[in-house]
Amino acid sequence: MFENLSERLGGVFDRLTKQGALSEADVVAALREVRVALLEADVSLPVARDFIKRVQAKATGAAVTKSVTPGQQVVKIVHDELVATLTGDEDPGALKIDNPPVAILMVGLQGSGKTTTTAKLARRLKDREGKRVLMASLDTNRPAAMDQLAVLGVQVGVDTLPIVKGQTAPEIARRARTQAAMGGYDVVILDTAGRMHIDEVLMDEVQAVRDIATPRETLLVVDGLTGQDAVNVATEFDGKVGITGVVLTRMDGDGRGGAALSMRAVTGKPIRFVGVGEKSDALETFEASRVAGRILG
Ligand code: GDP
């Protein structure tokens, strides 16, 4: 069972003499516990290592005030650094929607929650921002996925591009673009086909679609329960397609969200939203402090 990090650090510091500032030995002992906590939260090893190094430099010699214990002091420094790493300059919930129609490309592995997130995002843009949204499924491999998006569209009251059998993904993307322009839509969200694993065919297809759609945002949908794998997925998609942000799904589950830290650290791209359930309103704007708290347990 995971213990609360503050409690663990309390244990470490109980054995140390209380001084006015955190000594290097105190910090090193404390950060050993922090490292375990990060790894338990599924943060990837290189990211955890790097993070610890940064915190060590910041914490060594930090003044400890009377009102807090050294353990609490280290937790605060770790928490602040986590938030700083997870937060960029951008406002995560504000997608760049100017010059309509704007295309948003949804990419990711199969089962990551891409189609569900497409509908959640469409609903959010419609309800909260009053946008006219069109959704299109480009998953030519799985007719069921196309039907799924159409059903979700009816549920959330958002139009979907009519299904035309036999078209390739780039052809559908082109049709979606034309339809969005002619129909006076503000946003067209393209739900691309996923694969079980990263492969060349998938990447070539997504690249071809991207070149036609010229998306303003390319959002990578990643299952928040996947740990180390998330970093590889994010690196691959960012390298090949160029992502503008990440949506972390299944954050309503037991996962501790370490993938958020790993992906942010490795790609530098912001986590924009988190999926917190199967329903179409279960999408929240990413909040760094909440995920930081969760990573620390
Ligand atoms: P896709 O293959 O990437 O398009 O994945 P789907 O959108 O079909 O989602 C796969 C499954 O994950 C579905 O049963 C969704 O209801 C579920 N799902 C998606 N997002 C979330 C989430 O944030 N929380 C939970 N609990 N389930 C989710």
Image: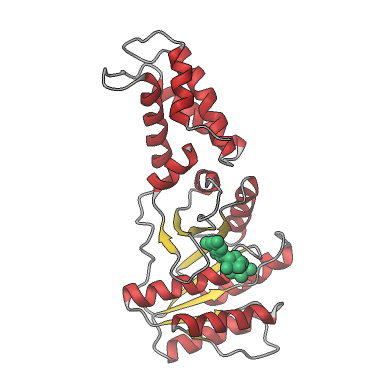
**Residue 151, image x, y percentages:** 55, 83
The colour scheme of the drawn protein is secondary structure
Q: Nearest the camera: 201 or 52?
A: 52
Residue under the image location 57 percent in, 30 percent down:
36
**Residue positioned 51% across, 18% down in the render:** 29
Q: Does 226 sit above or below residue 247?
A: above
Q: Is residue 107 visible?
A: no
Name which quarter of the figure residue 262 lies in.
Answer: top right
Q: Position of residue 189 (x, y in %)?
A: 49, 76
Residue 256's x, y, as percent?
53, 45
- Is 169 situated left or right of 285 in this image? right
Relative to 77, 159 lies left or right: right
- Near-viewer residue (9 or 139): 9
Q: Quadrant of the N terminus?
A: top right
* Residue 88 seen in the current view: yes
Q: Position of residue 99 (x, y in %)?
A: 36, 77
Q: Residue at x 54, y 87 (%)?
A: 161
Quadrant for ligand 1 reads bottom right
- Vertical position of residue 277 compared to residue 142: above or below: above
Q: Residue furthest front?
A: 1
Say which residue appears at 39% left-offset and 41% top-offset. 83
Q: Residue furthest top?
A: 17
* Nearer to the camera, 2 or 258: 2
Q: How many marks?
A: 0
Q: Is residue 150 left or right of residue 286?
A: right
Query: With respect to residue 262, does 246 lie above or below?
Result: below
